[in-house]
Image: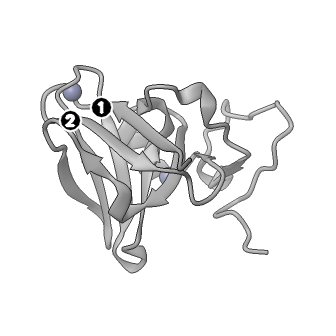
Amino acid sequence: MELTLIGRCLCGHVQYRCGAPLAPATFCHCESCRRAAGAHVVAWVTVSADTLVFTAAKPVEFNSSRRVFRSFCARCGTGLTYRREERAAEVDISVSSLERPADIVPIDHIYMEDALPWDRPGEGLPQYPKTRPVD
Ligand SMILES: [Zn+2]
Ligand SMILES: [Zn+2]
């Protein structure tokens, strides 16, 4: 059976479902995620863009940096998605907006070069200065 993920914003105005992760989730410590979320780290999981369906209101999307679009709930502000123009088939979903976030376990930390001095994860997962290396 194909895994379906469901999620929502804090107020429930925006609700979605999407297909199974295309890759394991990551913790992003970049400055852009930090400012967008108002939090020092954001957990993201990548899913196929054509599986993502908004089942109540749609989020508002904005151009957060060159060729990057982030979305959030217009009512409560919860950050929900991240996508890049050059990888149009994929979209990142905020793990914390999932109905069952504990099911999706991040495996590493990316953009540690942007992490704040007091943000030094100690649980032993791999940490990369920029993106996850392609193997
Ligand atoms: Zn909301
Ligand atoms: Zn980021």
Q: Is mark 2 within 8 Å of ligand 1?
A: yes
Q: Amino acid at mark 2?
A: Cys
Q: Calculate the distance from the C-alpha at mark 1 to the C-alpha at mark 2.
A: 5 Å
- Which residue of the protein is positioned furthest toward the front in this rendering? 1
The reply to whether the C-beta atoms of the residues labelled 1 and 2 are less than 8 Å apart is yes
Name the residue that disc number 2 marks. 73
Instruction: Residue 49 in the image: state x and y as whole percent.
Output: 37, 63
Of 96 and 29, which appears nearest the observer?
96
Question: Alpha-carbon neighbours of circle 2 within 10 Å: few (<14), some, or many (≥20)?
Answer: many
Instruction: Residue 22 in the image: state x and y as whole percent.
Output: 57, 60
- The structure's colour scheme is one colour
- Which residue of the protein is positioned furthest toward the bottom in this rendering? 86
Quadrant placement of the C terminus: bottom right
Q: Quadrant of ligand 1?
A: top left
* Label number found at residue 78: 1
- Relative to 42, residue 53 above or below: below
- Relative to 66, residue 63 above or below: above
Q: Residue at x 51, y 56 (%)?
A: 46
Q: Residue at x 81, y 49 (%)?
A: 126
Of 96 and 112, which appears nearest the observer?
96
Instruction: Residue 4 in the image: state x and y as whole percent.
Output: 46, 43
Residue 65 in which image quadrant = bottom left
* Element under disc 2: loop
